[in-house]
Image (spheres, rainbow, N blue to C red):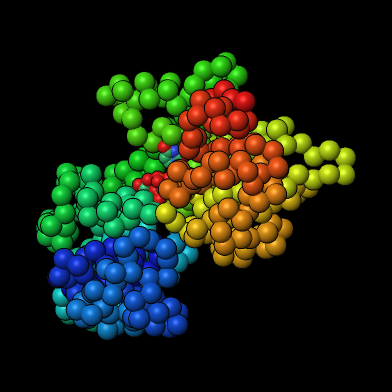
């Protein structure tokens, strides 16, 4: 099939590469020529394991075309996926749909009226958005077409086909979905989307458009709820002398609950959970649904990173004129990404720097992004052990693999005090005690 993907962020570029890898011809539309040139040269512009190889392979095979021209792409495409950003609106949390609507207008101005096209938002969009996209395209098409032309529903339809990939495992997740959700109004669109997704495993869920749109928000909000629940149990465990990971492991053994997404942490971040919980809250406020559960999920998420920052202040207090120097491992919102959107680690280092701590930081991928956002209030290092040298304590904020089996004896010899404050529970407390560390972890007793 020939398809068009509008936008080349995480969702757009991964989807483009995966569909191309199955032999489809894929046009990717962007608006910055310099970025499109880099994509043509095999640079995916984002950090995503395995993506550069896939991009190069499909560029070489001639299955990917990067362009700013809608007319060229839409002339040939039977399916168009809108994959542009829908960031939260400051203040209300509502998804900002400006770009979605702008590209819809351009689609309407360029859609080929002589073949049937399905237009679908892959970006996470509030319920009702795909129908607004339909109205915008219809209004543009009506301006262009003569009275004799075929009716608009013979020219195009809209559908919702949400994406569930996680950053860092985007290719694996796209190739191995738990389910393919298709929300559509007509059988032709369903058949075309089913055909495009034929090579993928996973259950098929065919439903109406509002349900498909809501499935995405419901999934992300429930996952975020699980995380805040786990982090609330961590707070209980810290007060009551329980071990939160063990408690949650046992809780997750109940098949009705499941073991995944129960790792305690410094809170969830990233481009999706924070934004989607806020957007569903905004929708609830608009349509009169009580959103106290979603509000609580967000509140606990805020408490999670604040609780970590408070622990640091307690264990490594600033005394009169002496500011402790903290080594920090990890800034990305999770491992295997350079993404720092809503990253709790960035909130924590900003808070600690403001409170007067000196911070030396290391992250394998995210430092440039952090430098752009918060500048030189912290000091950046290229090597993980260099930050530890002479620091008063080590703070672990992202669960990168290279931290999991770090040389603990070396860390002890480099630190001024043998203190590790671990927001991701990477180490075994009894082993840390044996090694002579004061080990402050999350939802577990401090060992010393
Ligand atoms: C999420 C959804 O998982 C995905 O289905 C959707 O398409 C996009 O949003 P992503 O944001 O990439 O994906 O990352 P995910 O791995 O789900 O992690 C989100 C946040 O939760 C991270 O900050 C992570 O550190 C945190 N997390 C995750 C935990 O704190 N504990 C866990 O057990 C799992």
- Say whether residue 243 is left or right of residue 142: right
Q: Position of residue 122 (x, y in %)?
A: 32, 58
Q: Residue at x 34, y 34 (%)?
A: 260
Q: Quadrant of the N terminus?
A: bottom left
Q: Residue at x 38, y 54 (%)?
A: 168
Q: How many marks?
A: 0
Would you say 304 lies left or right of 54 here? right
Q: Is residue 77 visible?
A: no
234 to 422, vertically: above or below: above
> Where residue 365 sits: x, y (%)?
49, 60
Q: Nearer the viewer, residue 221 or 437?
A: 437
Ligand 1 position by quadrant: top left
Residue 436 image point, x, y percent: 60, 30
Residue nearest the viewer, comparing 392 with 267: 392
The one of 27 and 167 positioned closer to us in this rendering: 167
Q: Position of residue 134 (x, y in %)?
A: 31, 63
């Amino acid at each position: 099939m020939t398809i068009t993907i509008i936008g080349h962020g995480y969702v757009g570029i991964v989807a483009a590469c995966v569909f191309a890898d199955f032999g489809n011809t894929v046009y990717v539309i962007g608006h910055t020529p310099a970025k499109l040139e880099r994509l043509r040269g095999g640079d995916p512009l984002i950090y995503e394991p395995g993506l550069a190889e896939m991009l190069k392979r499909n560029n070489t095979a001639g299955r990917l075309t990067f362009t700013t021209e809608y007319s060229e792409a839409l002339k040939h495409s039977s399916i168009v996926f809108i994959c542009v950003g829908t960031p939260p609106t400051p203040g209300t949390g509502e998804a900002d749909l400006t770009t979605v609507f702008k590209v819809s207008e351009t689609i309407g101005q360029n859609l080929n009226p002589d073949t049937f096209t399905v237009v679908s938002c892959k970006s996470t969009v509030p319920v009702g958005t795909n129908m607004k996209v339909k109205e915008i395209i219809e209004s543009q098409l009506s301006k262009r077409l003569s009275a004799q032309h075929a009716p608009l529903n013979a020219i195009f339809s809209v559908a919702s086909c949400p994406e569930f990939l996680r950053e860092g495992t985007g290719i694996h997740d796209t190739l191995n979905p738990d389910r393919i959700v298709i929300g559509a109004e007509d059988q032709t669109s369903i058949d075309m989307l089913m055909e495009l997704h034929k090579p993928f495993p996973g259950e098929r869920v065919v439903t109406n458009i509002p349900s498909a749109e809501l499935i995405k928000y419901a999934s992300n909000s429930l996952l975020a709820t699980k995380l805040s629940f786990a982090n609330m149990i961590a707070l209980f465990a810290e007060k009551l002398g329980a071990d939160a990971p063990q408690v949650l492991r046992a809780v997750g053994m109940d098949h009705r609950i499941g073991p995944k997404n129960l790792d305690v942490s410094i809170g969830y971040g990233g481009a999706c959970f924070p934004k989607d919980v806020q957007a569903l809250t905004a929708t609830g406020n608009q349509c009169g649904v009580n959103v106290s559960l979603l509000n609580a999920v967000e509140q606990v998420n805020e408490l999670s990173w604040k609780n970590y920052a408070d622990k640091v202040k307690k264990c490594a207090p600033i005394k009169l004129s002496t500011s402790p120097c903290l080594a920090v491992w990890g800034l990305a919102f999770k491992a295997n990404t350079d993404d720092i959107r809503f990253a709790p680690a960035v909130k924590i280092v900003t808070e600690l720097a403001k409170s007067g701590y000196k911070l030396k930081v290391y992250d394998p991928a995210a430092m440039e992004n952090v430098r752009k956002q918060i500048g030189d209030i912290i000091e950046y290092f290229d090597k993980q052990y260099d930050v530890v040298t002479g620091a008063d304590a080590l703070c672990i904020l992202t669960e990168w693999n290279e931290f999991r089996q770090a040389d603990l004896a070396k860390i002890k010899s480099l630190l001024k005090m043998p203190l590790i404050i671990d927001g991701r529970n990477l180490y075994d407390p009894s082993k840390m005690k044996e090694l002579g560390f004061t080990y402050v972890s999350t939802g577990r007793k401090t060992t010393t």
